[in-house]
Amino acid sequence: MTAVKIIGKFLVWCGIVVCLGIIMVSASLYLYISPKLPDRETYTNLRLENPLRIYSADGKLIAEFGSRRSRPIKFEDIPPLVTNALISTEDKRFFSHRGVDPLGLIRSVAGIALGNDWGGGSTITMQVTKNFFFEGETAYTRKFKEILLALKMERELSKDEILELYLNKTFFGISAYGIAAAAEQYYDKDVSELSLAEIATMIGLLPRPNAYNPLASPRESRNVKQRVLDRMLDQGMITSAEHQEAVGAPNMAFRNGRQTELDAPYIAEMVRLQMIEKYGDLALTDGFEVYTTIDSGMQAAANLAIAKGLEQYDRRHGYRGRENHMRPADDGSTEQWLRVLDRTPVISSQEPAFVQSVGEREITALLKTGEVITIPWDGIRWAKRFITSSTWGSSPRSAHEVTEAGDLIRVMKDDNGEWRLGQIPAVNGGLVALDPNTGAIMSLVGGYEFNDRGRNGQFNRITQAERQPGSNFKPFLYTAALENGYTAASLINDAPLARSDYRPENFSGEFMGPIRLSYALTTSKNLVSLRIYDALGSDVVLPYVSRFGFNTEDFPQNDLTVAIGSHAVHPLEIATGYTVFANGGYKVEPFVIARVDNFNDGEMFRAQPYTVCPACENTAAIDTLLDNNQVPEMPDVTPAPRVINERAAYIMNTILRSVITDGSGRPANRAMPDREDIHGKTGTTNDANDLWFSGYNGNLVTTVYVGYDQPQSLGKSEQAATVALPIWIDFMKTVLEGTPQASMAQPDGLEFVRISRKTGLRASPGEDNTFFEVFREENVPGYEESSTGTDNSGFEGPQSPF
């Protein structure tokens, strides 16, 4: 008996020692860990993760980048059924404990010790702490920290605040964090619109979101839904009728998400890269919303114009044939074709299809949807055989000459909704439109199809391609001439250069002798351009054209071919340069991000672009107001700097207008005869490798570029006026419709004078073959024989030795 007492006392003391040890260790851990626990502000001001969203200027969604989606919701906006379902399932004693449920904790610890998953240990409060701070830690360490922080949270937050944190932060599967985001992702609803069955489904998936979600595992989802409903019924939270109705409700979950509303992938990628450069990895997770300068209507018009223009060019040059071939199955099955079609992407509006049968004048083809379509002869007859860009075969006489059963082809609908044989263009190109008064990018298309990875689709031809602009560059040179002694009527000799190392020609191969500067630019005479460049010299020309935004440090020195656009530039540089003509002489910078908002912090950035502001430079008027003790009303803008003389800008506008009325831009005049405010210039390089058109009115500048990614000729019969200009017309005709005329106002100090076409001098009274030309007042030419006997030569610039 004594031995028993001794053993009993020993065990008691051992128990006391163990308990004291546990208490001491726990106290030590508490003292060590407690100061490191986050404070109240940390877990009440957590930054919820959200994707980067990019919008047009008028609020249409262009793109989303980032996998996590969260949407905060206040506790008062959460339906009671949601919190009841959560409490009944995850922590039925939530309102009675202080953050830790001892019974559940003992069960959980025992399970961990024995290697079993008995669950039930973590209260809702502890799950909040785990979701926020302790991901990836060991079970014992995490559990102890959860206990300490849960106790701390319960002292500092109300139960409602804890529930709000839980329902905003917890992962609900398929990239949705929080009940509000989950409601959108699964049901495309607001939380307040969820049915009891839908609430039970989402609460039921919380223990294993990927395994129990209704999209991946409908059967498991149905089981956990019923488990939640059963517990709610047992705890008196719902009636039997409600329970029965919810249990029998069908699974209506579907992967939802905000659909893009505007096709502008090149803009989206530009913005994504700029945001990452500025904000790093947070750009894709911190809930940034970027509002761009893009006008959705203009962007849609640009998409259509580029696609149509490239497809029309491609069809003119013949059919390159099928993309692939798969022999029809012996039993007539189409399963193998459908498998191939399923992994073959739609490119632009062109769908992949397998030819099922070929008639004399029609084709039947199978789409990836399983639909069988018929292509009539009008949709096939264009498909003459492609040989080169300049040669092709004769037009087909039957569909058998074009394709056969088993061919993988492209099909698309024409303007009348009829199916036609398609073809992904081998050529590519781009379009950019700028607001000349601010530099805002209004629309941009960098290629035929951004997602066509096999054809370098993500390469942005507007911002990344460096191509020779050809004659599209000449207006910058001619403006330099106008500010360095030349007038629009100056005579320059259009004749071969007397050089042995370089024998350039005009596009037509003909020479006209002495012609006026304005006529030379209107008709794009190469020899005149070379003479002007040679007379002025690169030390004058290159610094001058840099005012338009070109990086002339990369331009070759003393290379005459710069005059005719031999140095490669980005199309965006060309468009930016033309804004100087459109706005009357001011330099603006292109930009695409107008405003950046942040989900957590509100507005983060607002663009303050250089803005054309003539009133800002009217110092005389401002001084007059100040002298009269009046405060001038000044626009709240950053004034754009003037880079060329306003009179030179106006003269260049009149010349570029004549390109539209009398030069290679005449198709634009025929297409828009009522628009007296459009100006522009074509550009065609050697062998028609690169084709351009840049044109504008006072409110919009648009540059179109077309060419192969690996430079080659677009064909002997092609030039800028046949390829790039029609795209420009299709775009501008659409976006300018119904808008008022907008041209540069004539500045003071200019005079329109009647000029002799023969001499470039002032015409005598009654003289025939004359026209009006605009001059600076100090440069108005005299008559051929003045009263003083002075020789008034029409040439007023430096002389070229050639």
Image (tube, rainbow, N blue to C red):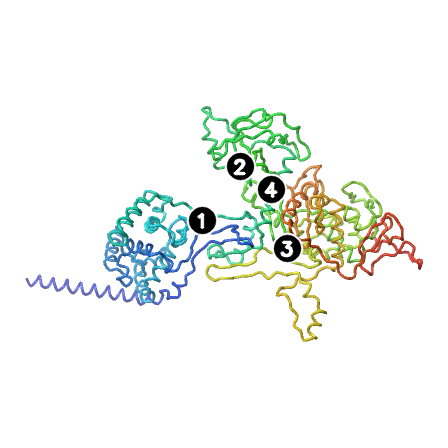
| Residue 84 x %, y % | 30, 55
- On screen, residue 282 above or below 356: below
Residue 550 visible (yes or no) = no
Q: Which residue is mark 2?
A: 351
Of the two numbered discs 3 and 4 on the same chain, state the one appearing first in sequence: 4
Tag 1 or tag 3, which sits nearer the N-term? 1
- Check contact, mark 3 vs mark 1: CB within 8 A: no
The percent position of residue 527, horizontal first and vertical second, equals 79, 46
Local crowd at mark 2 within 10 Å, few (<14), some, or many (≥20)?
many
Q: Is residue 465 visible?
A: yes
Distance of label 3 from label 4 (alpha carbons): 23 Å
Q: Secondary structure at mark 1?
A: loop
Q: Residues within 10 Å of mark 4 (few under 14, many from 20)?
A: many
Q: CA distance from mark 3 to mark 1?
A: 33 Å
On screen, 324 above or below 456?
above
Which one is earlier in the sequence, the residue at label 1 or at label 4? 1
**In the rendered view, does 74 fall on the left or right side of 728?**
left
Instruction: Check residue 257 in the rendering and tell me which mark sits there, or answer none.
Output: 1
Alpha-carbon neighbours of circle 1 within 10 Å: few (<14), some, or many (≥20)?
A: some
> Upstream in the sequence, badge 2 or badge 3?
2
Residue 729, located in which quarter of the rendered image? top right
Q: How far apart are labels 2 and 1 at the CA level?
A: 25 Å
- Which amino acid, by three-letter code, is at mark 3? Asp
Q: Residues within 10 Å of mark 3 (few under 14, many from 20)?
A: many
Residue occupied by mark 3: 435
Q: Which mark is residue 307?
A: 4
Q: Is tag 2's residue or tag 1's residue first in the polypeptide sequence?
A: 1
**Badge 3 element:** loop
Q: Quadrant of the N terminus?
A: bottom left
